[in-house]
Image: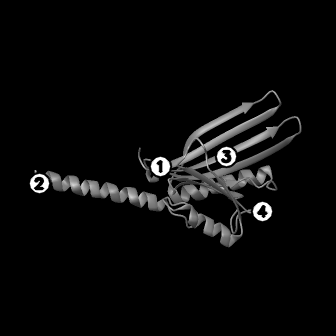
Amino acid sequence: MKSFLAILCITCWFLSMASSHAQALLSPPFGLKWGDTPENLFDWAERQKLDVTLSLPGHQRDERHVTIKNSKGNLPSHDASSLEARFNKGRLYEVVLNYADPKMSFDLAKLKFSEAKRALTTQYGQLKLSSKKRGTTRDNFTTEATSYHIEPVSGLFLMLSYTEVRDSLRKTRKATFSIIYHNDNVIPKK
């Protein structure tokens, strides 16, 4: 019986170490940490002289959504056009980097998406296809959306999402993508 308890304790310890190791490996960008308070993000944005928008969803009282943009272009030393952070009860659980620079051409956006996918695959391992959708509206708009993800631990994932819109009537096209870092394990269980 004692040996069974010892094996059980060792197994639980290994599982908890693997979970915390995976969470450390899949850390949010810009030096943020899971469970951080919004103040750390506000301090960074203030030091960088960035625009901050705070949203307090009425139907989600524990939620705080922060969007950070640079009025002069992309985020400092980065290709992302904005950063969105979500907090639950004051603790960071999601960061989204949006790559939607209006000056970025369709071809460059598609190239940057491919480069981001390669870099994330190299850093975190093979990303799995999550979703692929294509549709056309009566207004001659064609949309295509593709997403990939990796989830090293239940509740902790990284998602790469790509969207392109083609306007057949005006012969224009636009592409954007986002990298989503998400950790449900930070959100208190109800």
Q: Earlier in the sequence, mark 1 or mark 2?
A: 2
- Determine the CA span between mark 4 and mark 1: 31 Å
- Determine the CA span between mark 4 and mark 3: 24 Å
Q: Is residue 84 above or below residue 147?
A: below
Q: Is disc 2 in contact with disc 3, using a CB cutoff of under 8 Å?
A: no
Nearer the observer: mark 4 or 2; the answer is 4
In the picture of the structure, the residue carrying the numbered disc 3 is 162
Secondary structure at numbered mark 3:
strand
Nearer the observer: mark 4 or 3; the answer is 4
Residue 76, image x, y percentages: 70, 68
- Determine the CA span between mark 2 and mark 3: 53 Å
In the picture of the structure, the residue carrying the numbered disc 4 is 71
Observer able to see residue 102: yes
Q: Earlier in the sequence, mark 4 or mark 2?
A: 2
Nearer the observer: mark 2 or 3; the answer is 2
Nearer the observer: mark 1 or 3; the answer is 1
Observer able to see residue 30: no
Q: Is disc 1 in contact with disc 3, using a CB cutoff of under 8 Å?
A: no
In the picture of the structure, the residue carrying the numbered disc 1 is 184
Residue 138 lies left or right of residue 134; in this view the side is: right
- Looking at the image, the residue that sits furthest to the left is 1
Q: Residue at x 36, y 57 (%)?
A: 18
Specify the amino acid type for callout 1. Answer: Asp
Specify the amino acid type for callout 4. Answer: Ser
In the picture of the structure, the residue carrying the numbered disc 2 is 2
Specify the amino acid type for callout 3. Answer: Tyr
Secondary structure at numbered mark 2:
helix
Q: Is residue 179 above or below residue 59?
A: below
